[in-house]
Image: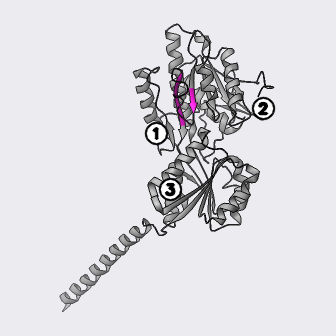
Amino acid sequence: MKSKKLYLFASVTAAVLALAVVYTLYTLWLSETERRSHITVGFIYDGDGSTPYTENFMNAAKQLDVTYEDKVTVIERFNVPYDGSVEVLDELVSKGCDLIVTNSYGYGEYVKEFAGSHPDIQFCQATGDNANSGSVVKNYHTFMGAIYQGRYLCGMAAGMKLRQMIDEGVISGNEALVGYVAAYPYAEVISGYTAFFLGVRSQCSSAVLKVKYANSWSSYAAEKRLAEQLINEGCVLISQHSDTVGPAVACENADKPYPVYHVGYNRDMLEVAPMTSLTSCHIDWAPYITAAVKAMLQDKEIEDVVKGSIHGLDAGGGIKEGWVKLLPLNEAICTKEMISAISEAEEDMASGNIHVFKGDYIGVDVDDPSKTYDLNREYIENENASAPSFRYILRDVIVIEEDTDSGKK
């Protein structure tokens, strides 16, 4: 009798366990199953397809069509002024948007306030830094790629080219002057050109960086003019954190006894500068945006689906996560050894083996010269947020210069 009871008990236990396994598998399956059949995603851009920065977001929007086909409807609005964004937000809500993506920091304040009044809609703000500050709005999110990683790798390529020019006697070591056309003196921009320059210095220790601000994100005339100024002041290589091809055109057309090489941003510049463009880098916004849409379709929290560094309602990612991309090096002017070395460095960056903001440098706070940072103690960028925070000008090796002809447009 006892053996029958034990057998019955074992059978029941086995059945319960089997049901538990089935239920667990069913739950896991449910969690990966799309619970919505369709969503509408709205995009608000501060520019249009003529600027590489906006074009990258447009490419991410196109990726939604490829990934989700008829499960997603995309609505795009272009050239929206920051202070006019609420009107466009209202329009997208009236068109039934479930998720709204805005592409520029300037929208952040307006979108966060708007999101508080529309809790059933998710809002994702690119390059924002206010998701976790002040009053937290649960349906307002920020995201950005760790672009400093791509800039450092681009800097390495630039440094290798400078070293080649020195070795071949084209320039001397003290002529390794690099120019940089920057948009504004913001942390995002300072972090970017510092990472780029530290990449340069890793290969060419005599290099010095001269920076000029355009005070605009996308002025072709200003960017080209500043690049020309830097070239005339002796810069033998130009890079940029601005949205147009102006600096690349200036390099390609430079009337110098040597080539003035260029490193771009946001797009491949080979089309406009085939003989001088070394490489470029950009943020690929698709990994975040497609994951946000997946979360919506599965009725999950966005940060539970996004693959990257998560800080509350903020998300970021770099080379490792596929958020930051180094565009191909120009084989016409880059040696096979350079290409191989950069490819290896890209793997090292993804593995965390490259420490960008580290070295025998003293950084001076851009707003308060009494505040300094000794880079012998590594500065960890994006440690607590996706938005860059490095805001120090490296003493003696980075020089900030004025536009010498700012009256021209």
Q: Amino acid at mark 1?
A: Ala
Task: Provide residue 131's location: percent of width, then percent of height.
Answer: 66, 55
Q: Secondary structure at mark 2?
A: loop
Disc on res. 194: none
In the rendered view, would you say 53 is above or below 203?
Answer: below
Disc on res. 291: 3
Query: Which residue ends up furthest to the bottom in the rendered image?
Result: 1
Disc 3 packing (10 Å; few <14; some 14–19; many ≥20): some
Q: Amino acid at mark 2?
A: Ser
Question: Residue drawn 63% across and 62% down?
Answer: 139
282 vs 366, left or right, is left
Q: CA distance from mark 1 to mark 3?
A: 20 Å
User: Circles 3 and 2: CB distance less than 8 Å?
Assistant: no
Residue 183 in view here: yes
Disc on res. 370: 2
Question: Which mark is nearer the camera, 3 or 2?
Answer: 3
300 magenta-colored: no
Q: Nearer the viewer, residue 363 or 113?
A: 113
Magenta-highlighted residues = 263-281
Task: Provide residue 404's location: percent of width, then percent of height.
Answer: 77, 21
Q: Quadrant of the N terminus?
A: bottom left
Q: CA distance from mark 3 to mark 2?
A: 43 Å
Q: Secondary structure at mark 1?
A: helix
The residue tagged 1 is 350
Q: Quadrant of the C terminus?
A: top right
1 or 2: tag closer to the N-terminus: 1
In the rendered view, would you say 373 is above or below 121?
Answer: above
Task: Provide residue 5's location: percent of width, then percent of height.
Answer: 23, 89
Q: Nearer the viewer, residue 178 or 369?
A: 178
